[in-house]
Amino acid sequence: MNQIDHLQGVWSCVSATINGKVLPEETVKQLRLTLTRDRYQTEKGTEVLFDSGYTVETSARPPRINIVGTEGALAGKEAQGIYALEGDTLTLCYTMPGKERPAGFESAAGSEAYLLVWKREKR
């Protein structure tokens, strides 16, 4: 089983920090991430926030993820990130297209980094 298979599933958000600002719990509870072999989709309630493709580079340390926009202004552009998968917890840290890939799992004020922790939903 390759790394991308381990990432597949539906994930509920545990915490989210964007540009150093922690999102309110009410917002976090509504966030959901669905990963298939080639799709990366985040939703807030019934609203789709991102519907993208993605690739992973498991040989890098930490492993890298590139989220590729498929529509609108982000079509064809890559958000660059890193991730850590420990059991049923997925930690993602990424920046929007045009920004440098984060070096560590942090989202300091002014970094424009997104730091999200997801918990795999039980089937």
Image (tube, rainbow, N blue to C red):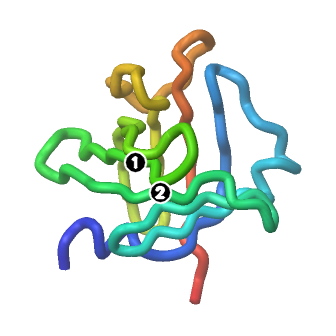
Q: Residue furthest front?
A: 72
Q: Residue furthest left?
A: 59
How crowded is the residue under tag 2: few (<14 C-alpha within 10 Å), some, or many (20+)? many
Whether residue 109 sits left or right of residue 26 in the image: it is left
Whether residue 27 sits left or right of residue 3 in the image: it is right
Q: Mark 1 highlights which residue?
A: 67
Q: Residue at x 26, y 54 (%)?
A: 56
Question: Mark 2–mark 1 contact, CB under 8 Å?
Answer: yes
The tag on residue 39 is none
Q: Is residue 109 above or below residue 57?
A: above
Q: Is residue 53 above or below residue 8?
A: above
Q: CA distance from mark 2 to mark 1?
A: 6 Å
Percent across and percent down for residue 80 are 36, 36
Q: Quadrant of the N terminus?
A: bottom left
Amino acid type, residue under disc 1 in the picture:
Ile
Amino acid type, residue under disc 2 in the picture:
Ser
Percent across and percent down for residue 107 are 55, 24
How crowded is the residue under tag 1: few (<14 C-alpha within 10 Å), some, or many (20+)? many
Tell me where residue 21 sits by quadrant: top right
